[in-house]
Image (cartoon, rainbow, N blue to C red):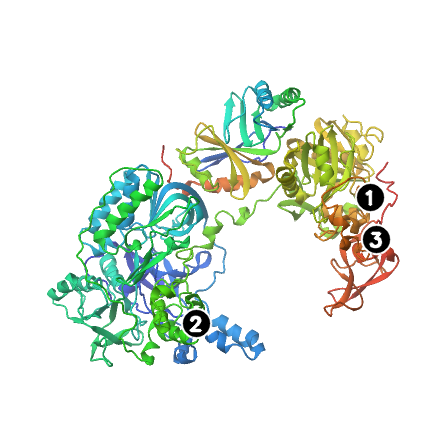
Amino acid sequence: MSYRLPKGGRLIDRDTPVTYTFNGRKGTGFAGDTLASALMAKGQAVVGRSFKYHRPRGVVASGAEEPNALVNLGTGPRHEPNQRATTTELFAGLTAESQNHWPSLEKDVGAVNGLLARFLPAGFYYKTFIHPRPFWKHVFEPFIRHSAGLGKAPKEADEDRYEHFYAVVDVLVVGGGIAGLEAARAAGASGARVLLVEQTAHWGGRSPVDVAGGAGRVDTLVAALESMPNVALRTRCMGAGVYDHGYVLAYERLTDHAPGTGGPRHRLWKIRAKQIVTATGAIERPLSFAGNDLPGVLLASAARDYVVNYAASPGRRVVVVTNNDDAYRTALTLHANGVSVPAVLDARPEGGGALMQEARAAGLRVEVGAAIHKAKGSARVEAVAIGGMDAAAPAETLGCDAVAMSGGWSPVVHLWSHCGGKLLWSDAHAHFYPDKDLPPTGRDGQGFVRAAGAANGVLLASGAGIDGADQGAQAAAAAGFEGGDTAGAPLDAPDEAPMQPVWIMPNGAGIAAREKMWLDFQNDVKVSDVQLAAREGFESVEHTKRYTTLGMATDQGKLSNINGLAILSQALNEEIPRVGTTTFRPPYTPISLAAIAGEARGETFQPLRRTPMHAWHEAHGAHWEPVGHWRRPYAYPRGTESVEQAVEREVKNTRQALGLLDASTLGKILVKGPDAGRFLDMLYTNNMSKLKPGRCRYGLMCTENGFLSDDGVVARIDEDTWLCHTTSGGADRIHAWMEDWLQCEWWDWQVHTLNLTEQYGQIAVVGPQARTVLERLGGLNVSKDALPFMAWIEGVLAGHPVRVYRISFSGELSYEIAVPAHHALALWEALMEAGAEFGAMPYGTEALHIMRAEKGFIMIGDETDGTVIPQDLGLDWAISKKKDDFLGKRAQERSHMTDPSRWKLVGLETVDGTTLPDGAYAVAEGDNELGQRRMIGRVTSTYRSPTLGRGIAMGLVERGPERMGEILAFPGTDGKLYRARIVDPVFYDREGEKQNV
Amino acid sequence: MSDALVLKADPFAGAARVAEVPAPGMITLKGDLSSPALADALSSAVGIGVPDIRCIVADGERQVAWMAPDEVLLLLPRAEVGEVLAGLAKALDGTAHLAADVSDMRAVFRIEGGLAARETLAKLCPVDLSPGAFAPGEMRRTRLAQIPAAFWMEGDAFTLVCFRSVAQYAFDVLKEAAAEDARVGYFTEA
């Protein structure tokens, strides 16, 4: 049974049928339809079920404010829940499923909740699911989780692309209705850079539907704007949020109406605007009468939108009920299009003005002082019981299949309010509107947002355009642009008689009726719920919102807020403006998470840092380890080797022959200037100013609180230049740390710093054959005398300019070679080639870790965790006693820091040779002050040492160094108890003979 | 070293063309930019004075870019780096400064395509890239999606630099932003 009217439909193309699927059944609409209009034309009254009571619900609105018609849209990689059918443009192959129904839309098991409605009052969850406690986890929560929520979460990865776009404009106009178009024209005429965004696919807002000559005026304005080079126009682009300093997010839906046609799906505009005009229109309010949530009951403006725009009729017999003149347009439009209007029920005792006269002249039955006492029906409204607003009982039952209701209009003040714009209450219109004297203010204390047209409380089309032009011109002037032709043209709309607030209908409705008056359709909040909340003491509107869930659904209460507020204020016996509104928060309607992520997904989710040898490692089977944003080879498994076997081989090969490590990720910061030595003496615990040019020194950096923060080798380059190596993850942090002290504290010291980390590739050549291979490459004297331990030289190696540091983190003979990054791969390959006959193999970070642990060298992040001072680690030798000061010095003298019972570094050796679990705690007899088992230490690094063939570990133990030989117990999370002896942390080559050859 | 390229990747041709180009020689010079000594040293070394804030000045193959209140970046043929560094060291002897060869630190990209090139960058960088706002002569240090980057214009094409370790990331996000089917159509000629 088609509800498509034979004529009209200004947005549809009847020559282009479009096939779609709803709940598995095929339907056909026309190009230009929305999913909602196509379903309406098909006669599909029930489009979803409500959240709490699973009541059948139909389309209520025709735009972004729709609470009911939410669908799971698309399938597979394009599945998305909670999509509003009213803003979903129809496309061929569209697949949608209604939400919150089981097993089917028509027969829903959860609807039994509706029978239990009196047991599911406001605050139901808080009151009911408290006892017995275990029931929450095992009974209540699983049940609620199953029945709660609307759409289904997507299961597949989104296959579309998303992007951002940064735009800077003088004037941003949000909303492409008559006010926004005029605002853009007026602002554009001044020469300002103007961007006008409109959330729908069409310009004009309500004017083409509501006003004779509206469409023509819109066309004229759009043509004028298109000819202005300084004005940009975007449709399907919603102003989503207004933030500080004129920052605005706009959400452009590029291919939602044509999925899979290429290009990004959504584009998130990040706009900086000097001035913003919010011409966001107004939203019609429902009326609260019993049964107002039945399918077929919809907003009066939506009813005429569907007829005029899509030639889709909400019913065949449509009763109109209103408290204002505007709904008469609906009655007249329906009547003119051949839809029966059995009655117009006007709640006002005197009725309306010119439009009412027009309706009467057209022969329509108009009742004044009239009300719907109850809408009747099950899956769709079938009749309305009508009578006087003040009558106790209905006088008559009218058969109908739709009700068009209007409770007045509320300006869309969301964007005005996002950044702090204040509101005033209009008694005449019963709505909040922007207080132009209290706009959101910028850094200069001046307002940067102006509302225009209906959003500014100028509801009539006759004035909206004029206000738009005025606000647009003012915005341009505030942005520094004067002049131009700014006068807006009035549209010819009749004057309207005053509306009359109607918060419940009829006035004396009893509790049974109030329990069927829906305020929030999506979250199933009724008049009775808000009244109950007030009785239970919820006086704050914010508390009532959370207690009842009014306005907390995906529509954020666009239809329900004012009605709910009015009910609350009546129950509290307060003025509406004194009760106030809840806070308007961005985004205006939900935007996709993928649009927020933009390009940050897949391969470009996060920048991945690659060393100059990255591709070589990849080609040689590297098993990767993330280190900061770097990827470093953890090991290079060969053939069928496991990662563990590879690590063992790499350690042994390096100790016995020759290993190469890509150390390019090490931080390298150049520090230069007459005060550089003094500066480094403050930064490091040891004495760097006394280091001689050509020499290296291992240094420690602490925070002001004394805790060890970073370590590395410092090389003195010349009289006033030092090169500071940092940990791989620490380069940027330490560079910022240096600049912080130089810029904020020691600003008069003559020191410059430069982070050279990326300028050099760095290769560690390690093992007994290290010198041999460098000699084989030639060009540089790396003999013991020419390059002793802890010295560096510059020169040319195998044709590459290099700086070679004789330093060792493995305990072996070791050279670290810095080479300009573009040379690094070539030098690496040359080393591998020349080293082949000596058994050269690359080794990864795990072999590096094991070898340093065998030597008892600490690792920042393993032995340190932000609470450890160098003295805890036995590094007193690296702390100068001669310096007056260094960062951390005084902190390390605090009593807690010098407490002899601090946990200190020791080696740990399991009694049976096994490997201790990482992070395990050593326990002692007794309990601590919290009644927990007393802990006296923990494992900080633990490995199986291939060199020693047993487990080795380091740990921090209470008075550890005083307890050598003692055996500690470490309960593992695997249930086993590990026993380990306290030993010296240097497990290998204690005398350092191997590195000093 | 065969060339000063980080990626061995084919140029990308979309709405805009994105290609890695060989990095020129680069020298970072830090010091008191308001001191005559530094200005003189710079002029004698490369024939260009200290650029104004956020500007880049070119003379033939040599360019000097303002990087920070105490830092400029010299761009010049790689072969000239050693000589210019030596010249700076000599001219600034006794003046607190830092000059270092940073020729290998960065990857360099060229983004061509007129308005589409502007739109490519405007998707990734919080910068006003409209023709009336960004023009040759300006040097912009900014953020390219999640990484630090800097760019300037030569003719109607952009040269962009980023750290070499993230060259692949930069190329990847630039390619996506420059895709033929992702034109924005927002900018118009000034």
| Marks 2 and 1 share the same chain | yes
Q: Where is residue A955 in the image (x, y as percent from the top left)?
A: 79, 55
Q: Position of residue A694 (x, y in %)?
A: 77, 30
Q: Which quadrant does the C terminus of chain A fall into? A: top right
Q: Is mark 3 on a helix, strand or loop?
A: loop
Query: How far is disc 2 from disc 1 in space, using C-alphas?
Result: 66 Å
Q: Which quadrant does the N terminus of chain A fall into? A: bottom left
Residue A877 image label: 1
Query: Which chain's residue wears label 3?
Result: A
**Of discs 2 and 1, which sits in the foreground?**
2
What kind of residue is marked 2? Phe
What kind of residue is marked 1? Trp
Instruction: Identify residue for label 2.
Output: A538
Labels 3 and 2: the sequence-earlier one: 2
Instruction: Identify residue for label 3.
Output: A949
Labels 3 and 1: the sequence-earlier one: 1
